[in-house]
């Protein structure tokens, strides 16, 4: 090799190596297959590629195959002009395949829909096909994932159809590039440079989302700024939409309900006012003229001070339907958030969304989805499923999960959230009897919904590795996989991500899968065990603050939720308390109401119990509380020990980064344990259980801690 060529090859390999090490490549690392037997098998099966040409999406698929196969197989695979040669990977839409292949796969083709795809063997070839160009791209990514994770492709037959229609990321990004509840740097949207400057990161973002089937992105914060609806910003949004379109990703915007006043010079935003209706219609037409495939609006209204239809004595139905009419001619949708609670409602905060929305079931227009958080409070480490999921059979309900870790240690704690998502999706609502799972509500099969969706509050920022914590990438990845198929297991997702991101070595994958699956329970244990919730400190939500009780609204205070007193602790939501359990189906309500059947994981969510109440292990509630906090700390120590053994399988930089973060996580787990137990001890007046490590600092010390510059704090204008 010529010296100059060798030099540049070395530089290229070094750059690729560095991108792998710093996490920028996410789960799309195409490393050479190390298993020689498997490598030979792959090479024999894929000796050439026939790829349909045409659209930008098909060209992206072709480029991805070139990029992936040349790296994975460590050889260039030639493209050919015919699909008839043996050992050819044939890629294209169904209509583009020759008649013989179409006849072979006819039965599978009949049920393909929603940008699904089929990967199948045909004689000596492998076929990747779909009804749409986007389906072909999804199939390409799936096939490459099979090779990356070293799965057999002999006699492959995989039919994949997304089970939800709208699979979307909600960015809580502000126009000043701050990110509310963002822990991975600034917003990736460089509004000041748009539309003229297209950052490569936008393209890489679209590619990553397409690889896991995400097909939409809400660019702006739910605490909306009306300026994004002005012509100046619509032009910028158009530039992003043009980048995302070939990857199958639609853009959506948050609509500030008071926009007709703030940027439209109207005196009202009343949804029944004809001038307001016309203003929104004209605004929608303006947006669609610039962006024909604009997805629609996401709306947070009459919640946490945001304006909404109730400001004018109108209902959520009035507001949502008014906006829905403006986007309906363009096939757009309105995603109306059900996260509402009012300081004027003296009842249990957990009941308010149900109380406001369930009476409106069946009154929303066909292109309205009600976006409901997974639990009835607010993305806590553990919540029971939201009762709305079993109570609105005539209305499409869209799941809202939080990927960013607002209440789970920010981006310094390793928490595998698909385990949380799976727990919620598998929960049984009993809406139509046993087996009426939340997943069936979300994918529309329970009540034959015409439109379905899932949203995830993004954890993406400008950090080189996108998510701050390397394992935060697994939550983005896992959300996308579950949005495509809500029935996937968290174990399968964890194993996939580990193989794609780090190593296929079983001595790495097996223990790390176990670590990831247990990580969420560890966080619950050292933050909010036995059904406790909303114990975080004020504003920034960083660290414990169970003593906070001086905020202007009662439901903002942790003391509102744990209700610790000399008698005991916990929130009574049974018929003797707030009766929140009555919002669930009778089978679920009975389970939660009765102490004998209420899962101990939700015990203090639904019951106020004596400190001396005996749990199933025979120990008192007080002792169990301390033991659970200690168990969480012990579990993080176990995670540290497990990670130490992974050093041989990864780069030194990969090891050091997670190792440092685990040290922070352990320190903060002890902080949560000590501060919480010291505070609760002021009520229980009992000694700590002997198995629990004793705090080394005082309660006064923990109460004195302040964090004015913690990341992700909500902007003051909200």
Image (cartoon, rainbow, N blue to C red):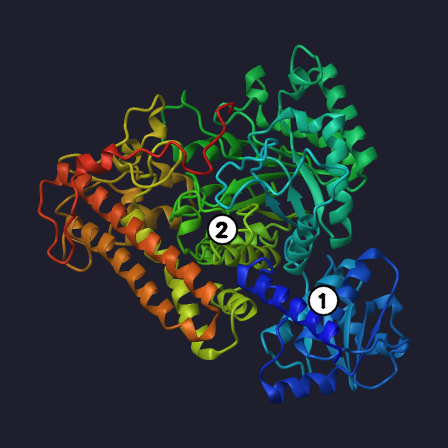
Within 10 Å of disc 1 (Cα), the crowding (few <14, some 14-19, many 20+) is many
- Measuring from the top left, give residue 381's x and y in whole percent: 38, 48
Q: Is residue 73 above or below residue 234?
A: below
Going from the N terminus, do you reach mark 1 or mark 2 first? 1
Which residue position holds label 2?
A: 468
The answer to which of 582 and 454 lies nearer the viewer is 454
Dividing the picture into quadrants, the one containing residue 4 is bottom right
- Measuring from the top left, give residue 646's x and y in whole percent: 41, 72
Residue 318: which numbered mark, if any? none
Residue 139: which numbered mark, if any? 1
The answer to which of 711 and 15 lies nearer the viewer is 15
Within 10 Å of disc 2 (Cα), the crowding (few <14, some 14-19, many 20+) is many
Estimate the spatial distance between the alpha carbons at disc 1 and disc 2, rounded to whole Å. Answer: 29 Å
Q: Residue at 53% across / 47% down in the picture?
A: 459
Asked if the residue at tag 2 contacts the one at tag 1, i.e. Cβ–Cβ closer than 8 Å, the answer is: no
Q: Secondary structure at mark 1?
A: helix
Could one spot residue 429 in this view of the protein? yes
Q: Is residue 601 above or below residue 317?
A: below
Q: Residue at 61% across / 31% down in the picture?
A: 175
Q: Is residue 385 above or below residue 279?
A: below
């Amino acid at each position: 090799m010529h010296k100059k060529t060798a030099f540049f090859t070395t530089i290229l390999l070094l750059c690729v190596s560095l991108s792998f090490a710093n996490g920028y490549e996410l789960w799309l690392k195409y490393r050479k297959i190390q298993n020689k037997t498997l490598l030979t098998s792959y090479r024999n099966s894929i000796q050439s590629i026939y790829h349909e040409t045409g659209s930008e999406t098909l060209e992206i698929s072709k480029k991805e195959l070139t990029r992936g196969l040349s790296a994975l197989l460590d050889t260039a695979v030639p493209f050919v002009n015919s699909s008839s040669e043996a050992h050819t990977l044939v890629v294209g839409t169904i209509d583009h395949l020759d008649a013989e292949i179409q006849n072979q796969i006819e039965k599978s083709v009949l049920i393909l829909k929603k940008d699904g795809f089929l990967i199948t063997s045909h004689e000596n070839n492998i076929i990747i096909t779909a009804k749409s160009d986007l389906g072909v791209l999804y199939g390409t990514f799936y096939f490459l994932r099979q090779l990356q994770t070293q799965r057999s492709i002999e006699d492959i037959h995989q039919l994949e159809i997304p089970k939800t229609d709208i699979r979307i990321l909600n960015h809580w990004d502000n126009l000043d590039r701050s990110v509310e509840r963002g822990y991975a740097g600034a917003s990736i949207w460089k509004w000041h440079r748009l539309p003229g400057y297209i950052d490569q990161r936008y393209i890489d973002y679209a590619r990553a989302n397409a690889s896991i089937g995400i097909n939409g992105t809400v660019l702006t914060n739910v605490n909306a700024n009306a300026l994004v609806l002005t012509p100046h910003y619509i032009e910028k949004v158009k530039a992003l939409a043009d980048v995302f379109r070939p990857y199958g990703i639609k853009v959506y915007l948050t609509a500030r309900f008071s926009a007709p006043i703030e940027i439209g010079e109207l005196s009202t935003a009343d949804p029944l006012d004809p001038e307001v209706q016309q203003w929104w219609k004209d605004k929608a037409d303006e947006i669609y003229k610039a962006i024909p495939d604009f997805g629609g609006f996401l709306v947070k209204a009459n919640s946490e001070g945001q304006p909404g239809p109730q400001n004018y004595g109108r209902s959520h139905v009035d507001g949502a339907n008014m906006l829905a009419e403006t986007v309906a001619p363009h096939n757009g949708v309105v995603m109306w958030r059900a996260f509402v609670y009012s300081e004027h409602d003296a009842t249990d905060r957990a009941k308010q969304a149900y109380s406001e929305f369930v009476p409106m079931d069946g009154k929303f227009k066909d292109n309205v989805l009600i976006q409901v958080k997974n639990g009835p409070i607010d993305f806590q480490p553990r919540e029971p499923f939201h009762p709305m999921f079993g109570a609105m059979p005539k209305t499409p309900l869209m799941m809202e999960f939080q990927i960013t870790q607002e209440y789970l240690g920010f981006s310094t704690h390793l928490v595998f959230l698909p385990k949380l998502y799976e727990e919620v999706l598998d929960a049984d609502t009993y809406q139509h009897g046993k087996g009426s799972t939340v997943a069936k509500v979300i994918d529309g099969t329970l009540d034959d919904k015409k439109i379905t969706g899932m949203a995830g509050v993004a954890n993406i920022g400008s950090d080189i590795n996108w998510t701050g914590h390397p394992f935060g990438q697994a939550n983005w990845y896992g959300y996308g996989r579950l949005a495509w198929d809500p029935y996937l297991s968290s174990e399968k997702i964890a194993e996939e991500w580990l193989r794609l991101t780090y190593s296929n070595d079983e001595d790495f994958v097996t223990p790390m899968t176990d670590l990831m699956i247990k990580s969420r329970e560890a966080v619950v244990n050292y933050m909010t065990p036995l059904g406790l919730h909303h114990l975080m400190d004020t504003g920034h939500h960083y660290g414990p603050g169970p003593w906070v009780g001086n905020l202007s609204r009662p439901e903002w205070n942790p003391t509102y939720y744990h209700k610790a007193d000399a008698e005991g602790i916990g929130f009574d939501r049974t018929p003797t308390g707030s009766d929140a359990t009555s919002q669930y189906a009778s089978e679920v309500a009975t389970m939660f109401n009765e102490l004998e059947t209420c899962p101990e994981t939700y015990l203090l969510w639904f019951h106020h119990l004596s400190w001396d109440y005996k749990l199933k292990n025979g120990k008192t509630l007080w002792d169990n509380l301390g033991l659970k906090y200690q168990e969480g700390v012990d579990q993080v120590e176990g995670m540290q020990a497990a990670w130490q053994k992974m050093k041989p399988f990864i780069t030194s930089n990969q090891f050091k980064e997670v190792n440092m973060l685990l040290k922070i996580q352990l320190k903060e787990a002890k902080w949560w344990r000590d501060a919480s137990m010291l505070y609760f001890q002021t009520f229980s007046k009992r000694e700590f259980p002997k198995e629990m490590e004793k705090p080394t600092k005082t309660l006064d010390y923990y109460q004195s801690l302040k964090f004015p510059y913690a990341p992700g704090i909500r902007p003051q204008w909200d």
